[in-house]
Amino acid sequence: MTETTEMIMTETTRAAGFFDQHQRATIEAAMSRIIPTDDTPGAREAGTVDFVDRYLSGIDYIYAKPDGSGFESLSGRSAAAWQRRVELAQQKYVEGVRELDERAQALAGEDFVGLTDIQQDQILAALEQGAELGPELAKPEVPYGIEPALQQTNAESDLDFFPLLVTHTRQGFLSDPIYGGNRDRIGWQVIGFPGPESLAEVHSGRYTTLDYFADDRRHPLRHGQPGQED
């Protein structure tokens, strides 16, 4: 990893977040039950709470620049659409933390962070059963190309708190570390994926995931169509 890339990742990971201390601890606890720590690291070690905390902080960290040098500045309709989207997600998380604590108090007289793992699993299972999961491919809030989803196939506005939490936990575990999660590439290590040193390697063509998706590594534009002899 280059010194510049490491500095950017450190600065963006430490950027001011949205949660207060209690909200952050509650979300971190819930995420750690979605991808728990067992014989391999889980959501807590991967810093998935950092991913969502910064995402909810505003619209400054939505799209990483292709060369990994920072983040794009949004403006106009794109900025307005993302601002609405983030504000809606903020509301869902605030209400979600409140509901987790209310259910925890009813169950054991403690806030969610004070429950045992088994009790926390009970609360999350109950939320899952009552959640509206939304369509697999939800209609975007604005047309594609104006407000593309952050590598998602669903629109956050169609998700209740629990499926939104699951979505962000997965993203924070497996996304490029520049987005704040996947600390020390822990998520990639768990699934056996080394990943690029930086987004710049992908942008320049020095890194490819072709080995993970194709048996025949010949590029069709360089070697003709698949099945043809060179």
Image (cartoon, rainbow, N blue to C red):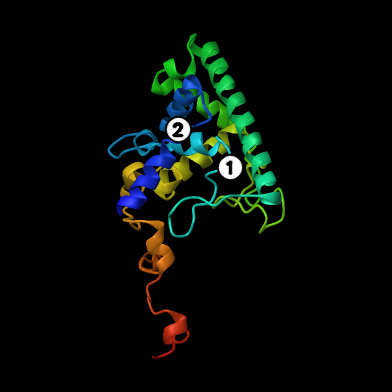
- Image position of 229 (left or right of 80): left
**Residue positioned 41% across, 58% down in the render:** 199
What residue occupies the far left of the structure in this picture? 39
**Residue picked out by circle 1:** 59
Q: Quadrant of residue 131?
A: top right
| Number of other residues with Cα within 10 Å of mark 2, as a class: few under 14, some 14 to 19, many 20 or more | many
Residue type at numbered disc 1: Ile
Q: Tell me residue 70's x, y (percent).
A: 46, 51
Front-most of residues 10 and 88: 10
- Whichever of labels 1 and 2 marks the residue nearer the N terminus, that label is 2
Quadrant including the C terminus = bottom left
Outermost residue, top direction?
109
Which type of secondary structure does the marked residue at label 2 adopt?
helix
Helix, strand, or loop for circle 1?
A: loop
Q: Is residue 142 left or right of residue 30?
A: right
Instruction: Pick whichever, 200 or 229, lies toward us.
Output: 200
Badge nearest the viewer, 1 or 2 = 1
Is residue 70 visible to us here? yes
For the residues labelled 1 and 2, the Cα–Cα distance comes to 23 Å
Side of 38 relative to 75 (left or right): left
Q: Position of residue 209 (x, y in %)?
A: 39, 64
Residue at screen point 57% across, 50% down? 73
The residue shown at (44%, 59%) is: 67
Structural crowding at the residue carrying mark 1, measured as other residues with C-alpha within 10 Å and reported as few (<14), some (14–19) or many (≥20) = many
Amino acid type of the residue tagged 2 in the rendering: Met
Closest to the observer, 16 or 119: 16
Side (left or right) of 76 relative to 12: right
Percent of width and height locating residue 80: 69, 44
Q: Is residue 191 visible?
A: no
The correct choice, above or below, for 195 with respect to 53 in the image is below
Where is residue 2 shown, x and y percent of the image? 30, 54
Mark 2, residue position: 31
